[in-house]
Image (spheres, helix red, strand yellow):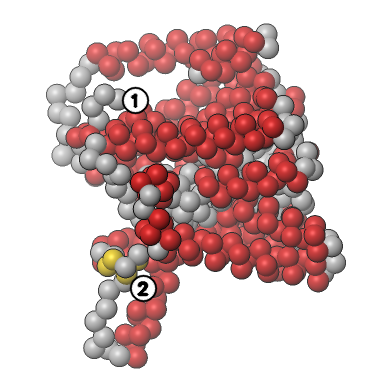
Amino acid sequence: MVLPLIVGAIYRENTLLGFGITIAALLVFGVPMIIQRPKDKRMNVKGGLITVALAWILMSLFATIPIAFSKEISSYIDVLFEVVSGFTTCGATVVNNVEALSLSILFWRSLSQWIGGMGILVFVIALLPKADGQTMQLFKAESPGPSAGKLVAKLRFTARILYAIYLFFTLLCMILLRVGGMSTFDSVIHAFSTISTGGFSSKTASMGHYNNLYFEIVLMVFMFLGSINFNLFYLLLLGNFKSIIKNEELRAYFVIIAVSVVALTLSLTLNRVYNFGQSVRYSAFSLISMISTTGFTTADFSAWPVFSQLILVFAMFIGGCAGSSAGGFKVSRIVILAKSGSREFRRAINPRLLSNVKVNGKPVENEVVMSTYHYFLIFIAVYFVSVLLVAIGMKGAFSENFVECLTSVLTCLGNVGPGLGSLAMGNFSRFSIFSKLVLIFDMLIGRLEIFPVLMLFYPRAWAKY
């Protein structure tokens, strides 16, 4: 929080007290925990899941303090919504006029996305001098995707390599935006939000405010880079191009994006929403923004044909690749489910068939396949329960709220940001307090991939081991 404190001091804003008090509170809260060492430093899977969930909740609660002190967002639930949306890289907002916020608060919103994109505890692991024995469970619990592993023998070096790549892309995106004419402050804000696939902007109209093709191309490139597995960039540094080309998740991601952009372009052109050139521009940006779960907007796609809107909904559900900063169900899980379904179809024809599900030429453990099925079922169950709960707090006609209700949960559970209907270019300010609390829960459960948060509600998880 020293960074937004410095920003507030530079621009002489009245947010200094809030950030100063929060920093002091964190020191008072944190120093005794450093002094008091646990007798047993071992950590199992259960401990890792609980620790990750509690850490994210505590970080979110402390992060609300400077914004609450500023009184720029009146309701504490709205402040909590904004903060959780930041850390989870959801990018959904309750602010009607973003430009009215202090620059230090705008900086803090986007910085929280940048930290949350790679992972709060992965950031901590990168800083710790010794972290391997006790924190592998934290790394696994916080890493998105069906499985997680180390790039090198030492976990802290793995975290540092990932963050070095992350920081390089952030700086490069920042420089390219600045070269294109964006202000220095806005370049920093949008670079943080792009590489983290978060989507917070310093403008109420998001990227539609600029209406600049160069900016859109730069952001499309970095939204895509932020949504593919960061391990591939390490392989690129090692010169292992063969493994990158053969990566089935990356190839599937390419195919999904290409087919979807073509379908969107044809739909928008044939329905005379835009001319061909505009259709390509808005289709490509909107699709990559949605599937990467960044959530920047340049067009009001609530006015698009139903077919076009459904493509964006599917993109929101699929999300980016495992091991990236993107949310969603993940392309790797789609690949595993597709290959597993194909195997079962072939077994129905030939019951004696013996075959494994293979990804990148290697057999996938049956445990991973089954966990993917279980994750899909729980994901769908959480989605429908959340839809029902959000609907409780919604008022008005069915036709006005149905689409917003369905897509608000999907966009928060997938950490995307915008939805359909009034949520395409609007915000979540009109939702009830109860609905916002449900959506906050969905954002957390979506970013941490369900199990760490659900573990908090499992009584046996708190038993001594």
Q: Residue at x 61, y 32 (%)?
A: 174
Q: Residue at x 79, y 43 (%)?
A: 211
Task: Check the image and name the residue furthest to the front.
Answer: 239
Asked whether residue 323 is in view, the answer is no
Left or right of 298? Residue 171 is: left
| 10 Å crowding of disc 2: few (<14), some (14-19), many (20+) | many
351 to 310, vertically: above or below: below
Front label number (1 vs 2)? 1
- Please identify the quadrant where the C terminus is shown: top left
Q: Position of residue 197 (x, y in %)?
A: 55, 43
Query: Disc number at residue 432?
Result: none
Left or right of 405? Residue 47 is: left
Please state which of residues 127 and 135 is positioned toward the viewer in this rendering: 127
Left or right of 426? Residue 142 is: left
Q: Position of residue 412 (x, y in %)?
A: 56, 47
240 to 436, vertically: above or below: below
Tell me which amino acid carries mark 1.
Answer: Leu
Please state which of residues 327 and 212 is positioned toward the viewer in this rendering: 212
305 to 164, vertically: above or below: below
Distance in Å between CA atoms under marks 1 and 2: 39 Å
Tell me which amino acid carries mark 2.
Answer: Ser
Which residue in the structure is indicated by mark 2?
340
Q: Residue at x 72, y 27 (%)?
A: 183
Please state which of residues 218 and 374 is positioned toward the viewer in this rendering: 218
> What element does badge 2 sit on?
helix
Report if the CB atoms under discs 1 and 2 are less than 8 Å apart: no
First of labels 1, 2 by sequence position = 1
160 to 22, vertically: above or below: below
> What element does badge 1 sit on?
helix
| 10 Å crowding of disc 1: few (<14), some (14-19), many (20+) | some
Asked whether residue 354 is in view, the answer is yes
Query: Disc number at residue 127?
Result: 1
